[in-house]
């Protein structure tokens, strides 16, 4: 566990693995939509939590982590929560009425400070279940905080978040799935899906005028963890990030819980 650090940057890439308000969407392309998230501009700051690999029905210390998240979120008065995927173990949701949604989400993150919007992206474990269940807006009627799409953009005024569906990039889920079954509805044909996604992401990043551009995904591009680099992302995604000539300051993905505060040109994190 690293300490709290700060870094002053003119431009920044982050790879990250409300009471109810109206989310306004503007079509960006066939694949990506933009959603506006108004923030409190009084202090020109943006504060959010990031968590991944959490859907354990309260076990594996999920409840304890949720409690600490609530304390931190209350202290910092966060704007929203970002989830980097693997939202429901071991095999996603079985459907929109799967009680795991309550057991792993609604009944766990109960602190008043965590009742803001949650922006969720899918992980490989989510693809082992009914993917369309997590994407279904009906879940927002069950819990107003829930928002999940495959790939999308959140415009939080001083920063833009580019959520990327990384699981379909990984070859082993298609060619060596072991005993697992993956729900590839909406992804096939795979080559076309990935080509469109990369093209749309590249266009959106180049067109963005945001001071901070934060890319969110489940799988790490580079990692010293036991899973190592995701070679498919090194091949296909990293060049898009590099061609923009923005500094890659910190790459964060699925096993990480992050606390970020953006204020002026300073970012603080704890990993």
Image (spheres, helix red, strand yellow):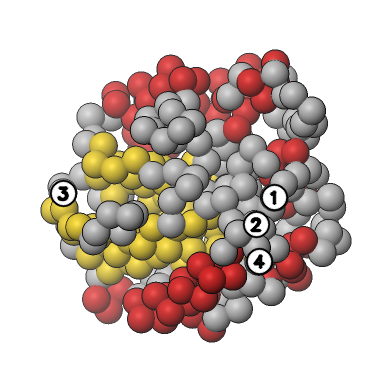
Q: Quadrant of the rendered structure where residue 138 is? A: bottom right
Q: Are marks 3 and 4 in contact (CB under 8 Å)?
A: no
Q: Please indicate whether residue 32 sits to the left or right of residue 235 in the image.
A: right
Label placed on residue 55: 2
Measured from the top left, where is residue 244 in percent x and y? 28, 29
Reading the image, the residue beneath label 1 is 89
Q: Residues within 10 Å of mark 1 (few under 14, many from 20)?
A: some
Q: Residue at x 56, y 41 (%)?
A: 151
Measured Cα–Cα span from mark 3 to mark 4:
38 Å
Label placed on residue 191: none
Mark 2: secondary structure: loop
Mark 1: secondary structure: loop
Mark 4: secondary structure: loop
Q: Mark 2 or 4, which is nearer the eye?
A: 4
**Whether residue 4 is situated above or below residue 167 in the rendered picture:** below
Reading the image, the residue beneath label 4 is 58
Q: Earlier in the sequence, mark 2 or mark 1?
A: 2
Q: Are marks 2 and 4 in contact (CB under 8 Å)?
A: no
Measured from the top left, where is residue 265 in percent x and y? 17, 57
Measured Cα–Cα span from mark 2 to mark 4:
8 Å
Q: Earlier in the sequence, mark 3 or mark 4?
A: 3
Q: Residue at x 84, y 52 (%)?
A: 95
Measured Cα–Cα span from mark 1 to mark 4:
11 Å
Q: Residue at x 36, y 62 (%)?
A: 259
**Whether residue 215 is situated above or below residue 257 in the rendered picture:** above
Q: Are marks 2 and 1 in contact (CB under 8 Å)?
A: yes
**Whether residue 15 is situated above or below residue 145 in the rendered picture:** above
Measured from the top left, where is residue 230 in percent x and y? 47, 26
Q: Earlier in the sequence, mark 3 or mark 2?
A: 3
Q: Residue at x 37, y 25 (%)?
A: 238
Reading the image, the residue beneath label 3 is 9
Q: Are marks 1 and 3 in contact (CB under 8 Å)?
A: no
């Amino acid at each position: 566990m690293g300490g709290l650090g700060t870094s002053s940057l003119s431009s920044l890439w982050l790879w990250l693995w409300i009471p109810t308000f109206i989310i306004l969407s503007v079509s960006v392309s066939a694949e990506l939509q933009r959603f506006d998230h108004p923030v409190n501009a009084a202090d020109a700051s943006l504060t959010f939590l990031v968590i991944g690999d959490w859907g354990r029905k309260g076990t594996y210390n999920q409840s304890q982590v949720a409690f600490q998240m609530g304390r931190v979120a209350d202290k910092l008065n966060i704007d929203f929560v970002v989830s980097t995927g693997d939202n429901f173990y071991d095999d996603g949701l079985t459907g929109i009425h799967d009680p795991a949604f309550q057991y792993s989400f609604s009944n766990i993150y109960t602190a008043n400070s965590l009742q803001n919007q949650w922006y969720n992206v899918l992980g490989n474990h989510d693809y082992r279940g009914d993917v369309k269940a997590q994407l279904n807006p009906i879940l927002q009627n069950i819990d107003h905080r829930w928002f999940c799409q495959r790939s999308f953009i959140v415009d939080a005024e001083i920063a833009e978040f580019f959520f990327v569906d990384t699981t379909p990039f990984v070859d082993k889920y298609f060619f060596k799935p072991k005993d697992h079954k993956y729900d590839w509805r909406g992804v096939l044909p795979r080559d076309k899906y990935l080509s469109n996604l990369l093209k749309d992401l590249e266009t959106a990043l180049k067109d963005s005028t945001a001071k901070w551009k934060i890319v969110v995904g489940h799988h790490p591009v580079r990692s010293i963890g036991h899973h190592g680099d995701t070679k498919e992302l090194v091949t296909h995604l990293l060049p898009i990030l590099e061609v923009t000539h923005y500094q890659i300051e910190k790459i964060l993905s699925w096993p990480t819980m992050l606390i970020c505060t953006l204020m002026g040109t300073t970012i603080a994190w704890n990993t």
